[in-house]
Image: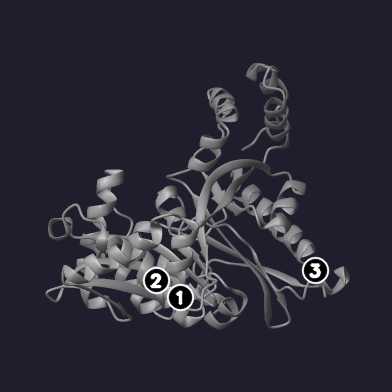
Amino acid sequence: MNKPSSLTCGLKFKIFTSIDQIGKDSIDSLSNDGFYTYGWFKTAENTPFFKLNPFYVTAFDGDKLVAFAPYFIDVENPLVPWKINWFLFKNTQFLNQWIKLPLARTLLSCSPLSDRSKVLVDRSYNRRSVLNQIFKAFDSVCQKNKILFSSFPFVSEYDKLLTSTLEDSGYQKFPCYTALNLDIQWKSFEEYSERIHGSNQGSGHSIRREIRKCEESGITIEVISEYKEVSEKLSSLYYNLFWKWNKQKSPCDVAFYRNSNEFASDNIRLFVARKGGEIIGFAFCLQQGETLDIHHCGFNYEVLGKRGYAYFNLCYYAPIKYSIEKGIKKIFYGGTLDATKKKRGCEPERMFSFVKCQNRLLRDYSTLTRRHPWLDLSARDILRNIPQLI
């Protein structure tokens, strides 16, 4: 049962720039998400690739942490507002020819290198009131740092409270992507295999065959907790996959794996495939409470060839079997490969992006043109009335 709003308003809201200023026990006690843990933020802060400029908004009841929201000033990759609101981008670009707009920076609220935006709030408090206070803090940081846009880029369709509160606070909602997740509802892996076979013709047989082929090829899979010494190997294997699909430098470099092993080992579950004692593939997963995230994987394609047995065993069957044994209730698989994931029991979950233009006139203009695309107001007309932003 929620506490009265008056008690919520009496909370102390503070902003920190280092996760160490808050502490491991405080954050982890609120979280049921591997991406929202002390270890993950500590890893990101200490990995140069991320180039973080973090702010952590918190609410305290005395010494007790009751709310936590991370956000970061994104300078190099302000992708979210532009991809989902091209019409606004086109006009603000025009305006930028006349006055200096801070278009290159966006305030993003999400966990680094993840596809989730959320605010951790103790459920015994008035959550909506807490969220409103946190959003006001967001607005304040934008004003002080001359940031035109703030965004929650990855909000689940099931997070109804966050969705409604964001909309009430002036954020526009846009479709983002569809994630695939697996609810663990089986008492054994054998039951899982049989159920999938019954619901998807041929899938059960495929699971058994793919497990058998993997074993016959001499590949073994294990979960390891210490991997700092093989960080270079992991980075190399992930680079193979990341370059194959993205043609750019991988975000998970050697420093990332070393730091994650040092700071987030409590949450990392590393599934490793070996052949002849050599690591030929891995799946990097995060566990917090009753949830498991399959974050990324890497492979030696020269050894594996075109066969996908190691992939299916590393990313699906071994984690599913592990989850059943450990009492995990849900596995998050992220987006892409929808057919492959649905065939193995995953269900879709829609994700939405929420964006707020911190300038009121531009925000009203964006809302108006989004609702009435035929209304083509001249950017010059807006320029005559727009208040100075900087």
Give the number of the disc on residue 319.
2
Three-letter amino acid code of the residue under disc 1: Ser
Kindly tell me whether residue 357 is visible in this rendering.
Answer: no
In this rendering, does residue 193 appear at all? yes
SS for dot 1: helix
Q: Residue at x 58, y 49 (%)?
A: 350
Relative image position of residue 301 (x, y in whole percent): 17, 56
Marks 1/2: CA–CA distance: 6 Å
**Is 212 or 168 nearer to us in this picture?**
212
Q: CA distance from mark 3 to mark 1?
A: 33 Å
Confirm or deny contact between disc 1 and disc 2 (CB under 8 A). yes
Which quarter of the figure has residue 132?
Answer: bottom right
The earlier-in-sequence mark between 3 and 1 is 3
Q: Badge 1 is on which residue?
A: 323
Upstream in sequence: badge 3 or badge 2 = 3
Label 3's element? loop
